[in-house]
Amino acid sequence: MAWLGPWHGGGRRGGGDLDIWYGSPFSSDLWDPFGGGRGGGGGQADDTAALAHANVDWRETDKAHIFRVDLPGATKEEVKVQVEDGNILQISGERTKEQEDKNDKWHRVERRRGSFVRRFRLPDNANMEEVKCRLVNGVLTVEVPKKETQEAQRNVRSIDVA
């Protein structure tokens, strides 16, 4: 499997036919597996460490690129999906803090809050005009269909062998 990890400090997990690349969980840099890894500016360590993280799985099938993003407790009003520069998919949003009562006594706060941004450069075969999204049970699914490629009709004629 070719290296697809965009982050510094990434590595490989698994073995055999199942190799999974991983990297910095707080990277908001552009994930560009088709153009050489890390890019897109942005992403200073101090800035990205403060962001609320959104875990993303990106799967490619014969017909589409499918993204699944874990956003527990998020509503569709808190999530934004955009297409930027023709082939960059940007998923962003904000996890807001719950209403607090002055009399509440907090023992532990572990759930992340704040803004998150994830950006992915898609290949030329992605049909960015037909992107579909749905948010069900805290999981955002973004489906980017592939452009249909029509095979050029070949003009074949038989030649008799003398």
Image (cartoon, helix red, strand yellow):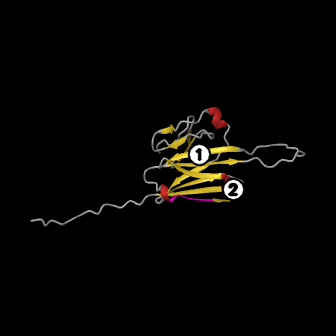
For the residue pair 19 and 133, the one nearer the viewer reads as 133
Residue range highlighted in magenta: 130-134
Q: Is residue 64 left or right of residue 103?
A: left
Q: Position of residue 133 (x, y in %)?
A: 58, 58
Q: Position of residue 152 (x, y in %)?
A: 30, 60
In this view, which residue lies farthest toward the right?
103
Residue 132 in view in this figure: yes
CA distance separating discs 1 and 2? 17 Å
> The residue tagged with tag 2: helix, strand or loop?
loop
Quadrant in the picture for residue 8: top right
First reached walking from the N terminus: tag 1 or tag 2: 2
Q: Position of residue 27 (x, y in %)?
A: 60, 39
**Magenta span includes 131:** yes
Circle 1/circle 2 CB separation < 8 Å = no
Q: Position of residue 13 (x, y in %)?
A: 57, 43
Figure check: 81 above or below 47: below
Residue type, numbered disc 1: Arg
Q: Identify which residue is drawn at 61% across, 52% down.
A: 80
Residue 118 has which mark? Answer: 1
Q: Is residue 46 left or right of residue 63?
A: right
Figure check: 49 above or below 147: above
Residue type, numbered disc 2: Thr
Residue indicated by mark 2: 75
Q: Residues within 10 Å of mark 2 (few under 14, many from 20)?
A: some
Q: Identify which residue is drawn at 64% across, 35% down.
A: 47
| Prevailing secondary structure of the magenta residues | strand
Q: Nearer the viewer, mark 1 or mark 2?
A: 2
**Magenta span includes 16:** no
Figure check: 8 above or below 55: above
Residue 15 in view in this figure: no
